[in-house]
Amino acid sequence: HEEVRNVIQNLTTRVLQRFIDSSPKGSCRQIQSYYDFDDAEVSSTIAILPLRITSLENDYLSHLVTLQTAATLASLDKVGIPRAVIVGVTDNEKYIAQRSFEMLKDRLIELSYVDVGTSSSEKEWKLVPKLALVEFHRIISAFNENYNRRNINSTFFSWLGPNPSRWKNIYFSEPDLILHIRPRALRSLSLELRKGHILNSHRLQPIPHMQQFADIYSNITHLNKELADRLKEVLLPNLASFSAVHQLNQFSRNDTCYDQG
């Protein structure tokens, strides 16, 4: 059912691209800006995102991973996290990271790519999150030891940026998990961080709904019944309790727009 797959792929691509294109200086920030709730804990948080790409042979999947990574970075920028580091082990991850960075040139967030695969065996490359944590811990320890002697080299800057001593917190996640936080929640979250607590984000699983595909379903029903039935099988039906979908108004102060939680 290639046609169904193409429809879903195209919609997924458009949604991610639209999210990326929504500038942090755009309408959502004008209505309710994260910076209205600015907090030192957010501005002193660095994001570490381990990434592993085994192949770039499939053009669509490569583009999708690029969009996912760029969307995740854009979400961090909207929250106010000032720096994100993508960690990889091969040229595949470097390629995806660089393409993602190109899509976010006008953003406030600092972006960097670090390769941790040169000193590891290929067997360990599947454990990129572990490698990223071990190397980041080594960098932090080495920086603290050398800080007073000002013996700071380019490796430190690749990880920590131009002002390495500013980081107090680490946001450790995956490059395909868009971060949603209500602006008003930042202060309470920051308070928990100051208490020394570890905060874990939770996943929200996106589910395709018939409302999103209503026009497409209507058009193909008369052309290809088998294809229409297949589409109906993979979508949440617009029936009974499933039809109660609340549409948020991003231009209203009573609603919080989708990319802010």
Image (cartoon, rainbow, N blue to C red):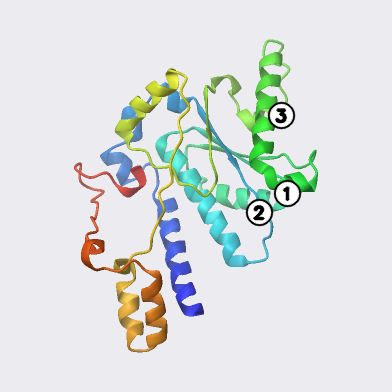
Q: Which mark is residue 90?
A: 1
Q: Residue at x 72, y 11 (%)?
A: 149
- In primary-sequence order, the first of circles 3 and 2 is 2
Q: Amino acid at mark 2?
A: Ile
Task: From the viewer's side, name the closer residue of 119 and 163.
Answer: 119
Q: Is residue 142 visible?
A: yes
User: Are the residues flagged by discs 3 and 1 in contact, CB closer than 8 Å?
Assistant: no
Task: From the viewer's side, name the closer residue of 184 and 25.
Answer: 184
Left or right: 242, with 169 as reference point: left
- In primary-sequence order, the first of circles 3 and 1 is 1
Of badges 3 and 2, nearer the viewer stands 2
Q: Quadrant where the C terminus lies? A: top left
Q: Which residue is mark 3?
A: 154
Q: CA distance from mark 3 to mark 2?
A: 25 Å
Q: Looking at the picture, how far across and down is residue 217, in whole percent?
A: 33, 78
Q: Is residue 103 visible?
A: no
Q: Which mark is residue 53?
A: 2
Q: Amino acid at mark 3?
A: Ser
Q: Amino acid at mark 1?
A: Thr
Q: Residue reaching furthest top?
A: 148
